[in-house]
Image: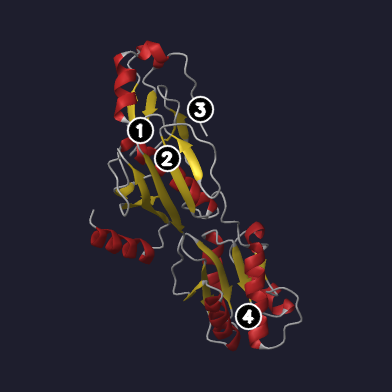
Amino acid sequence: MSRQNLSSRQAVLYASRTPYVHALVVYAQRPTSAKPGDEALVLADGTIEGFVGGECAEATVRQQSLAALRSGESVLVRITPEAEADVAGKKVVHNPCLSGGTLEVFLEPLIPSPLVYVIGNTPVAESLMSVGSAAGYVMQTYAGAIDDDACALVVASHGKNEDEALVAALKAGVPYVGLVASRRRGASVVARLPVDDALKARIKTPVGLAIGARTAGEIALSILAEIVAERPSPIVGGDQRVAVPATQIDPVCGMEVVVSDTSLHSTHPDPREQGRLVWFCGPGCQQAFLADPAAFAGTTRADH
């Protein structure tokens, strides 16, 4: 994939709020198939679009990229065929299957900013849109549809179209659902909603942290503060679309391999294994195993 096409693909992923990792080769010691400047995008399902090295290096980039997606933190990964001591500022990965050479790849996770829906044209709603945007949140006016990674929906419409929005957010599993209303009116609105008591109990009303807010701007600030306080952690699957991937151990080299459709794997040839899949970091290990599976019968499997 050319650099221009990669850039276009990034724009599509950004527009669709799809989390991914941008992998950039920053150092290559021969012999390596990759060179500085090579780059790829790694999606949450393990798909790699672009080029950052051969299959063995790619397997390591896939695994480390998915770890970066879960943590939300950028990392510089050094991939080397010889065991090395840890290096300050780098994640060193020993990949014995590399055909010589060393790679260093910078992995930058691009996770969509938190998405908040707001309904209403009131001063509080307008202030919340402004305060949220300034804090780096994606603020959208609710128009009947809810993205599956929305972190909050706030109704500040003074009685207009409240019920439908609240019910939709609750049924969609939005983590934070708030209603701007007095304690008395809020209780009345919640009581009439056609959902069970467990869902009703999730609605915040009165909404916002108790900071003594009086103006529309202060109320909006208290609401955003409460959203921040209760938003699920982005670490280890805070984003619903960034799941913790399963892994298996390559029986030949001992490398940990991400279990995905894009990872190299074969059905175990021994009928006693009942069609068990075996996962490999690269074609060399796959060929060695299929040539003599009994030689690796004592290797350990591991699911994570």
Q: Are marks 2 and 1 in contact (CB under 8 Å)?
A: yes
Going from N to C along the chain, the mark reached first, 1 or 3, is: 1
Q: Are marks 3 and 4 in contact (CB under 8 Å)?
A: no
Horizontal and vertical percent position of residue 237:
53, 50
Q: Estimate how packed mark 3 is, as few (under 14), some (14 to 19) or many (20 or more) residues with alpha carbons within 10 Å.
A: few
Residue located beneath label 2 in the image: 79
Amino acid type at mark 2: Ile
Amino acid type at mark 4: Ala
**275 left or right of 219 in image:** left
Cα distance, mark 4 to mark 1?
54 Å
Residue located beneath label 1 in the image: 98
Cα distance, mark 2 to mark 1?
9 Å
Q: Estimate how packed mark 1 is, as few (under 14), some (14 to 19) or many (20 or more) residues with alpha carbons within 10 Å.
A: many
Going from N to C along the chain, the mark reached first, 4 or 1, is: 1
Q: Estimate how packed mark 4 is, as few (under 14), some (14 to 19) or many (20 or more) residues with alpha carbons within 10 Å.
A: many
Residue located beneath label 3 in the image: 302
Q: Which mark is residue 220?
A: 4
**199 left or right of 270 in image:** right
Element type where label 2 sits in the image: strand
Closest to the camera, between mark 2 and mark 3, is 2
Amino acid type at mark 3: Ala
Element type where label 1 sits in the image: loop
Going from N to C along the chain, the mark reached first, 2 or 1, is: 2
Element type where label 3 sits in the image: loop
Q: Give the quadrant of residue 7.
A: bottom left
Q: Are marks 1 and 3 in contact (CB under 8 Å)?
A: no
Horizontal and vertical percent position of residue 39:
32, 53
The foreground one among 66 and 260 is 66
